[in-house]
Image (cartoon, rainbow, N blue to C red):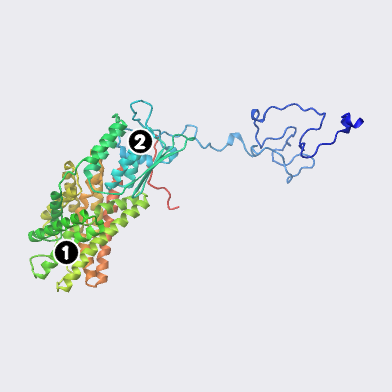
């Protein structure tokens, strides 16, 4: 059979599924091209065999059929016809390069790290000195991040501002060689992320701050630890962990009975500032100490701080109402209640909250100010309950009364210094810082008295100026001692707290005189904001006249935020 010979003319054609539409016909030979990977080409390259048309100097289409509106064929990377190499635009990077920023070791680590945080990420210098581990293989990333979070937790729990906490965390990670790290601080959460390289996955760790306490001695110890880590001193991870554990185990420098006596001294000194005498001093001190003991009792039973403030505000108000019921003319009940309020007003949290807001940490600032509001409401509730009961019993409280003028400036200066001293003890400050903050509080009251009494300037403006000087001196003290500025600032603003305006505002509300009460409370709020803004402004002024740490090439100081409202 011829059909079985298998001749090519008798073969059936292949189906479409059996061959590709792009397969070359049988019998044709094409040179084998090399793999595409060996000769990569751009998708914008001109195909082989196509010649681009030549254009004239004016850029018009060439050829017999080409006009001014005809399409031209050219590469996407061909420079425009108007481009001239002699008149090329300046390059993005200048020929002399970008000035290098090097942070010198002479400046405190707070300034160096704050400068880093306020720089764009692309302009930050390389890591500084690296603390090596024992095997010299580099730092263990998870342990460094854990140490950094524990340090940040102690600082945030101690009342430090969010920017200073981030600066400390940034300093620790960079000192151990983790230069690509970004810390984030909120009111109750700390997190940090480190990316080893551009191709590696980032390592992220976080820690929750569930309990906050006031102990500036512990705060100063943490600052010394960070200063040693960022200096030329070799501090291994094991040594840093050991010192951090010692800081956590350290007891408070003052026992409980000393804190109670300090609360009494603070309330008595505040009563003298508003015109009270020796008897008022003793009654105010007794009321504050009784309120402090009741607050300790509530804390031991696990009650929230809101109720602790409410209970602590009741004894001074009760003693003031009791003195009013005795119809004694030698004792000022308003001075007794005001002295008790001075011992409870949350000046520390207020300053920290406003400072966070001014430096751009709005979430943390909102949380801190909300905490201040709750504390203030607790104080208001405690005082109003007692005032309402006093009015029902026939107590004659005059919201229009005002305190006696400052006829004894020497006594009041000494009282302001005693108030700052007592405030420093309540904040658990180191004994070496008590004298400085006491003098700072006396200077603040002198400035306030000179402006408000002698110069007849608005008390709010005088408070802002005095608080600004407190912030300035506190920042200078902290630079000299390489400590946090809070121990030199917080206690010094004690004499400036709006205790009297708060009392008269609450008294007006209790007697249903809302216009007078709300006006006085508005003055108290304005005074509190003036204190916080003045403290922050004084701190920033101290940095304004000090050059950027190690700026080479005339680099300007970076602001906390540069959005300009956009």
- Compare residues 89 and 288 and report the one nearer the observer: 288
Residue in the image at 35% along x and 51% along y: 364
- Please state which of the two labelled residues, at mark 2 or mark 1, is closer to the viewer: 2
- Compare residues 263 and 446 and report the one nearer the observer: 263
Q: Label 1: state its secondary structure.
A: helix
Q: Label 2: state its secondary structure.
A: helix
Can you tell which mark lies on residue 249?
A: none
Q: Percent from the top left, x then y, of residue 212?
A: 27, 49
* Figure check: 417 above or below 194: below
In the displayed image of the protein, which residue is found farthest to the front? 1
User: Residues under labels 2 and 1: Cα distance?
Assistant: 51 Å
Q: Percent from the top left, x then y, of residue 404?
A: 13, 63
**Picture quarter containing residue 550?**
top left
The answer to whether residue 450 shows anywhere in this view is no
**Picture quarter containing residue 154?**
top left
- Compare residues 228 and 274 and report the one nearer the observer: 228
Query: Would you call the spot at circle 2 few (<14 residues within 10 Å), some (14-19), or many (20 or more)?
Result: many
Residues at marks 2 and 1 touching, judged by CB atoms closer than 8 Å: no
Location of mark 2 (residue): 144
- Compare residues 549 and 518 and report the one nearer the observer: 518
The answer to whether residue 467 shows anywhere in this view is yes
Q: Is residue 76 left or right of residue 212?
A: right
Q: Percent from the top left, x then y, of residue 196?
A: 44, 34
Location of mark 1 (residue): 317
Quadrant where the image shows the N terminus? top right
N-term mark: 2 or 1: 2
Query: Would you call the spot at circle 1 few (<14 residues within 10 Å), some (14-19), or many (20 or more)?
Result: many
Q: Percent from the top left, x then y, of residue 536?
A: 29, 49
């Amino acid at each position: 059979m011829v059909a079985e010979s298998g001749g090519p003319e008798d073969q059936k054609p292949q189906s479409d599924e059996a061959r590709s539409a792009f397969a070359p016909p049988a019998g044709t030979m094409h040179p084998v091209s090399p793999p595409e990977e060996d000769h990569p080409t751009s998708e914008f390259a001109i195909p082989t065999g196509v010649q681009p048309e030549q254009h004239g100097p004016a850029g018009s289409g060439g050829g017999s059929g080409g006009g001014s509106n005809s399409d031209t064929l050219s590469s996407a990377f061909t420079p425009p016809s108007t481009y001239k190499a002699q008149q090329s635009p300046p390059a993005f990077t200048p020929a002399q390069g970008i000035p290098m920023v090097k942070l010198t070791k002479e400046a405190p680590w707070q300034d160096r790290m704050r400068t880093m945080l306020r720089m764009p990420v692309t302009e930050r210098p390389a890591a500084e000195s690296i603390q090596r581990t024992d095997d010299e293989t580099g730092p263990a990333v998870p342990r460094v991040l854990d140490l950094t979070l524990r340090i940040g937790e102690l600082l945030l729990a101690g009342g430090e501002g969010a920017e200073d906490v981030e600066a400390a965390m940034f300093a620790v990670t960079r000192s151990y060689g983790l230069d690509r790290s970004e810390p984030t601080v909120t009111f109750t959460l700390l997190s940090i992320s480190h990316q080893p390289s551009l191709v590696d996955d980032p390592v992220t760790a976080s820690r929750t701050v569930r309990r906050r306490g006031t102990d500036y001695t512990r705060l100063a110890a943490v600052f010394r630890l960070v200063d040693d880590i960022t200096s030329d001193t070799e501090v291994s991870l094991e040594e840093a962990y050991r010192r951090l554990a010692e800081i956590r185990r350290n007891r408070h420098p003052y026992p409980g009975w000393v804190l109670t006596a300090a609360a009494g001294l603070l309330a008595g000194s505040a009563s003298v500032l508003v015109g009270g005498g020796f008897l008022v001093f003793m009654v105010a001190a007794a009321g504050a100490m009784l309120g402090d003991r009741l607050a300790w009792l509530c804390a031991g039973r696990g009650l929230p701080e809101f109720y602790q403030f409410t209970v602590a505000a009741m004894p001074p108000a009760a003693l003031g109402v009791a003195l009013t019921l005795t119809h004694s003319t030698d004792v000022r009940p308003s001075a007794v209640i005001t002295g008790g309020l001075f011992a409870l007003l949350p000046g520390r949290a207020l300053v920290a909250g406003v400072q966070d807001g001014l430096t751009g940490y709005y979430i943390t600032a909102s949380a801190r100010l909300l905490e201040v509001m709750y504390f203030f409401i607790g104080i208001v509730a405690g005082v109003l309950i007692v005032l309402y009961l006093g009015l029902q019993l026939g107590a004659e409280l005059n919201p229009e009364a005002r305190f006696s003028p400052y006829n004894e400036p020497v006594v009041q200066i000494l009282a302001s210094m005693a108030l700052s001293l007592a405030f420093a003890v309540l904040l658990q400050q180191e004994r070496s810082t008590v004298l400085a903050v006491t003098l700072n509080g006396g200077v603040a009251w002198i400035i306030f008295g000179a402006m408000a009494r002698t110069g007849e300037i608005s008390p709010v403006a005088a408070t802002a100026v005095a608080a600004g000087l407190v912030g300035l001196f506190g920042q200078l003290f902290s630079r000299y001692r390489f400590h946090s500025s809070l121990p030199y600032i917080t206690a010094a603003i004690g004499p400036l707290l709006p205790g009297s305006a708060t009392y008269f505002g609450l008294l007006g509300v209790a007697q249903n005189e809302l216009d007078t009460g709300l006006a006085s409370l508005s003055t108290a709020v304005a005074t509190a904001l003036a204190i916080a803004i003045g403290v922050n402004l004084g701190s920033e002024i101290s940095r304004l006249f000090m050059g950027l740490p190690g700026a080479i090439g005339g680099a300007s100081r970076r602001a906390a935020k540069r959005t300009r409202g956009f």
